[in-house]
Amino acid sequence: MNRLFNQTVSSAYKKEMELLLLCARPCPDKRAIEQIKSISKKDPDWRYLLNTALFHKVHLLLYQTLDTVCPEAVNHAAMEKLKFENKSNAARSLLFSNRLLAILNLLAQHRIQAVPFKGPVLAERVYGDSSLRQSVDLDILVDKQDAFTTMGLLWEQGFLPEIDLDENQFTAYAAKKNSIAMANPGSVLAVDLHWEMSANYASEPLALHRIKNDLVQVAFAGETVLQPCKELLLIYLCLHGTRDCWKDLESLGSIAALIRSHDNWDWKQIIKRADRMHCRRMVLLTLLLVQDLFDVKLPQTVLTFAENDPAVSKLASTVCKTLFDPGRFNSVAETKSKFSMFHLKVRDTWSDRIRYMRHLIFGTTVQEWRYFPMPGKLSFLHGLLRPLRLSMAFFLWVVKGRRTGAGFAPGRLIKRRVSGGKKE
């Protein structure tokens, strides 16, 4: 652990966090194994360690490492809890993997090209085992022109979209949004259907027709699936983690594992592409974090790029303070608000920040479509409803004193207003 870790981790829980970071690696080296054994003998707070691992979604890696390196040193109750979580997730991962392959085969039968990303495929790719990462849904990328047909095919499989749209409405919706969530009421399975991956966090859309030359065949669950090449996947994971304000250690750990599991990285090309996509600062921030927290070896050229942008170091310190704050376990939703200063400071230029704010203020969301449904030809009115909705949300936030620290939550406030305050 290096500068950022030492500056931001409380001394009261330093050994627990150090042990957690050492165990959150799929294959710790000899030096890391010795450190794990040494810290385990110092009577760490196993309850705190377990709760923190669950919160940061690295409990599966924690169990695998401790069970391999020093199971006898671990508190029995903590080890049994980790073992139970491991078995439960293994069964869930198997279900997700099988259903993902079934969906991909179904789409292939209808000549629809689809690319799964994140979920069990990412776990298999970076950890070598799909059960070492907790998945909550299946993310699938298709061409925008195939999205409505794909949604219909998934509907026939029992997946219901989060909003009910006819074809004309969906065309209008897809022109402004990049994905739609679909859930199966009779199953734990859910699908996020995408036709673009960057979600307004890059100036260059990551749509299927634009990244076809960046796709590779990857082995998964006995079959092969299309995946973004390692360089593009790295950039995407940087964008995705930034969008969520790096809410947990697993999102950084999977990037560290991706870098470690592949050789021959073209770092200059990655930075060049990040420049073209206007997400250089997001990429450099991520690389600085994984280098410091997970001891990932990066070339000096990359570190020099990060050092030449003073904002990167400041943002990294902010992220670490949030990650390692013992009191934040109940405030994740607040720290990932899209209306936070973090999302502005991580942009490369002022023009990028202005474009992002314009999108937040005038871009339509699922809430507009859900609570104010309109025919496709009138969907432009959602662009007018959005500022009004935000204004009302801000007014309620001020009146009721519901300060979140990172930013107010307009979607949640309006949802309560429209539904009469009832939970949905």
Image (spheres, rainbow, N blue to C red):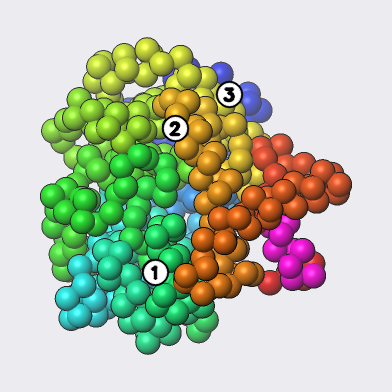
Residue 261 percent across, percent down from the top left: 22, 41
The part of the chain drawn in magenta is 412-420
The three-letter amino acid code for the residue at tag 2 is: Asp
The three-letter amino acid code for the residue at tag 1 is: Thr
Which residue is tagged 2?
A: 352
Work out whether residue 48 or residue 161 is closer to the camera in this orientation and state it. 161
Which residue is tagged 1?
A: 171
The residues tagged by marks 1 and 3 sit, at their Cα atoms, a distance apart of 47 Å
Work out whether residue 388 or residue 407 is closer to the camera in this orientation and state it. 388
Tags 3 and 2 touching, CB below 8 Å: no
Q: Residue furthest bottom?
A: 156
The residues tagged by marks 1 and 2 sit, at their Cα atoms, a distance apart of 27 Å
How many numbered tags mark residues here?
Answer: 3
**Image point (27%, 24%), residue name:** 298
Which badge, 1 or 2, comes first in the chain's sequence? 1
Near mark 1 (Cα within 10 A), the count class, few <14, some 14-19 or many ≥20, is: some
Residue 366 in view:
yes
The quadrant holding residue 294 is: top left
Work out whether residue 52 or residue 97 is closer to the camera in this orientation and state it. 97
Work out whether residue 382 or residue 333 is closer to the camera in this orientation and state it. 382
Q: Residue furthest front?
A: 377
Task: Give the label on residue 353, or none.
Answer: none
The three-letter amino acid code for the residue at tag 3 is: Thr
The residues tagged by marks 3 and 2 sit, at their Cα atoms, a distance apart of 29 Å
Which badge, 3 or 2, comes first in the chain's sequence? 3
Which residue is tagged 3?
A: 8
